[in-house]
Image: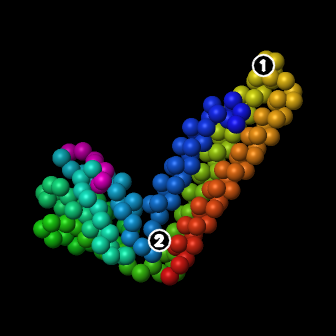
Amino acid sequence: MNEFLKKYEEEFDKAMEFFKGELSKIRTGRANPSLVEDILVEVYGAPTPMKQLATITVPEARSLMIEPWDKNVLKDIETAISKLELGVSTSVDSQCVRVIFPQMTEEAREKFTKMISEQLERAKVAARQIRDKVKEEVENAFKTSDITEDDRYKYRDDLDKHIDEINKDLEERAEKKRKEIMTI
């Protein structure tokens, strides 16, 4: 990997990790703790991520059990989940909040598939923006005679190959998630 790509490798990695995180939040036919763990719950006068308030488990394929460490926040957790309009039902007992995910309809599947496409496009735009920064640095290095013209073309080719790999990886991840959603 050339010096210009190495310099921005962390930014490329962050863009990929963000995309993976966003994909994990999109509902499939199964319950997944990542769907609710980052929900902000208004407790003690401050918004707090769910994962800092409770243990989130998956007792069955289509349900989550959220067991807060402080039982006084049960209602706050239920309120935060209901505000999101995830299309789930909740029930509260003295120990936990149960979140039940209904069977997904074809309309919901199409909606989530569209969300994947939107996230994919955002991730590609982020990669292109980083690519543009790298390209600009390569051009500036060439203008100041820090690199030769041959190096300039080699670095640009390396960059294009790297972006192609990233886009391929993004597409594969998005397609895998689409298949998860469409599987009944």
* Residue at image point 65% right, 39% down: 130
Q: CA distance from mark 1 to mark 2?
A: 50 Å
Tell me if I can see residue 134 in this picture.
no
Please state the total of marks drawn on the protein image.
2
Point out which mark residue 146 bears: 1
**Magenta-highlighted residues:** 45-51
Check if residue 15 falls in the magenta segment: no
* Residue at image point 49% right, 56% down: 22
Give the SS element for disc 1: loop
Disc number lying in front (1 or 2): 1
- Crowding at dot 2, Cα within 10 Å, few <14 / some 14-19 / many 20+, comes out as many
* Residue at image point 44% right, 60% down: 25
- N-terminal of the two: label 1 or label 2? 2
- x and y, in percent, of residue 87 in the image: 38, 72
- Crowding at dot 1, Cα within 10 Å, few <14 / some 14-19 / many 20+, comes out as few
Instruction: Using residue 29 as the reference point, say whether residue 4 is left or right of it.
Output: right
Q: Is residue 99 above or below residue 7?
A: below
The N terminus lies in which quarter of the figure?
A: top right
The quarter of the displayed image where residue 120 is located: bottom right
- x and y, in percent, of residue 142 in the image: 81, 23
Give the SS element for disc 2: loop
| Residue corresponding to mark 2 | 28
Q: Amino acid at mark 1?
A: Asp
Q: Amino acid at mark 2?
A: Thr
* Residue at image point 80% right, 40% down: 157
Instruction: Using residue 10 as the reference point, say whether residue 99 is left or right of it.
Output: left
